[in-house]
Image: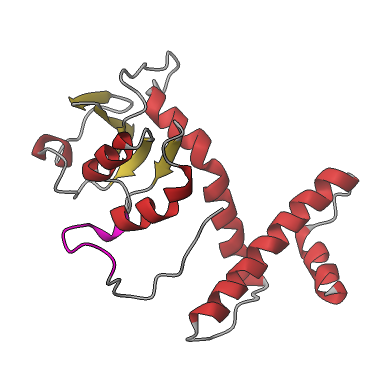
Amino acid sequence: MNGFPYLGKDDTRPAHQRLGDSVVMKLVEPYVGKGRNVTTDNFFTSLNLAKKLLQKNTSLVGTMNKANRELPPSVRVQSAERFATTILKHERATLTVYQGKPRKSVALLSTMHPTVSIGSDRKRKPETVTYYNVTKVGVHVLDQMARQWKRRWPVKGGTRRWPVAMFYNILDMAAINAHVLFKAYTSNTLPRRAFILELAKQL
């Protein structure tokens, strides 16, 4: 879709702009202005980024680190009862704080949800949390599979050259995608290890 390597200091980035904001704005440049949504994780989410994307007709839903200085102090130290939800508003942005675990809550910033409905089941998950989980599950599963792959059958070798490291990463992800497609189109349940060994022979 879009990508670029991070090589350290970026002279094109304005001095006042966060690295995470700069990365997101570059990556989504071909897709802004079309009413789409961007889902981000802790490193990239900020209120400033959400406002910039809104100006380009693009919404944002993302988790926020509890240590983020943009969060109010009450959110940073909050420890509510399990499955409780707190919702805060700032202009067109909605902050949802959900206590999913006894000692761990998650904070989500959204410009896509002007109001947040709460689930009626036991966990009473807010709409923003459910939306985030649905949109990010593929990314998390792929990362998990790639980590598992690298521990058991690593393609990656030691290198200091970023093009080589990127190539290794592309190989890992391509192998995972190939296995998914192979199972979908052949109805063959060949285990991933056997598939990868056969793929290596073919390559």
Asked whether 175 or 12 is in front, the reply is 12
| Residue 13 visible here | yes
Q: Is residue 33 magenta?
A: no
Residue at 80 percent of width and 74 percent of height? 200
Up the image or down, 164 lies above or below 142; here it is below
Residue at 50 percent of width and 42 percent of height? 136
Asked whether 168 or 13 is in front, the reply is 13
Up the image or down, 175 lies above or below 185; here it is below
- Residue 167 percent across, percent down from the top left: 61, 74
| Image quadrant in which you'd find residue 176 | bottom right
| Residue 106 visible here | no
- From which residue to which does the magenta span run? 12-20
Q: Is the magenta region chiefly helix, strand or loop?
A: loop
Residue at 29 percent of width and 74 percent of height? 9
The single residue placed furthest to the left in the displayed view is 73
Up the image or down, 49 lies above or below 95; here it is below
Residue at 32 percent of width and 30 percent of height? 111
